Image: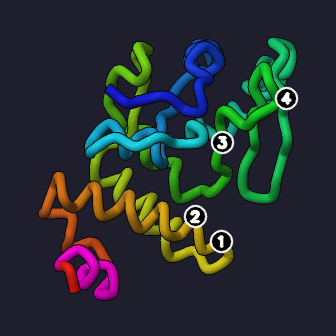
Amino acid sequence: MATAINGHEADFARIVGIVDSFGPWCLIGGLAVNCYAEQVHTRDADIVAMTSNLTPICERLRSEGFRIEERRNCIDIGGSDGDVVAQFTKYPQYQSFIGRSGEQTVMGVRCRVACLEDVAQGKLWAYAHTTRTGAKRKKDELDLIRLVTAYPRLKAMCPAELRGLIDGG
């Protein structure tokens, strides 16, 4: 079972309930990694929902008191204390993850989580994204190492420099 996101378990449960009411979606990112590998604390829940549902989901979240901040490639969802609790990706390549997702329990809430290979692929895309800060790239690197440690078959998906780190060299 995946662990807390900045102590926002209640906000997470509310978001899951709202997003569920709009149809298919799934968790991606660090919280999804925690479902498959050694758990670490993560800042927020990364979510992919059907693109056509993003506007009504955000309207509903706003009406429920969440702060919505639209960015170029994502939508940040602020919780009861203003901290970002969830982030919806707008990258279209994640849409196919929804159909391959499965149900898991995350912080006591049943929700959809991207399949293992898709979680790894999403982390590889994030790791390769040159505009991410060094700290975020290092977190993506760690997430990939955690996944490969738990599922060695994923190593073949990784670029050479990451395989070198995984091998300890």
Q: Position of residue 134 (x, y in %)?
A: 60, 74
**Would you name the residue on which mark 1 appears?**
133
Q: What amino acid is found at the position of numbered circle 4 in the picture?
A: Arg
Vertical position of residue 102 compared to residue 96: above or below: above
Type of amino acid at the residue the image marks with label 3: Phe
Callout 3 crowding tier (Cα within 10 Å): few <14, some 14–19, many ≥20:
many
The span shown in magenta is 159-167
Q: Determine the residue positioned at 26% across, 45% down.
A: 37
Name the mark on residue 136: 2
Q: Position of residue 51 (x, y in %)?
A: 66, 41
Residue at the location (55% across, 32% down)?
5
Instruction: Check disc 1: other Cα within 10 Å, few if <14, some if 14-19, many if 20+.
Output: few
Residue type (three-letter) at the residue carrying disc 2: Lys
Is residue 163 one of those drawn in magenta? yes
Q: Which is nearer the N-term, disc 3 or disc 1?
A: 3
Residue 10, placed above or below residue 137: above
Residue 105, position in %: x, y?
35, 20
Among numbered discs 2 and 4, the one appearing first in the sequence:
4
Amino acid of disc 1: Thr
Q: CA distance from mark 2 to mark 4?
A: 23 Å
Q: In the rendering, which numbered label is found on residue 67?
A: 4
Of circles 3 and 2, the one toward us is: 2
Q: Which residue is mark 3?
A: 88
- Could you tell me which quadrant the C terminus lies in? bottom left
- Name the residue at 78% across, 19% down: 80
Q: Report the number of discs.
A: 4
- Asked if the residue under mark 2 is in contact with the one under mark 1, i.e. CB atoms within 8 Å, the reply is yes
Q: Earlier in the sequence, mark 3 or mark 2?
A: 3
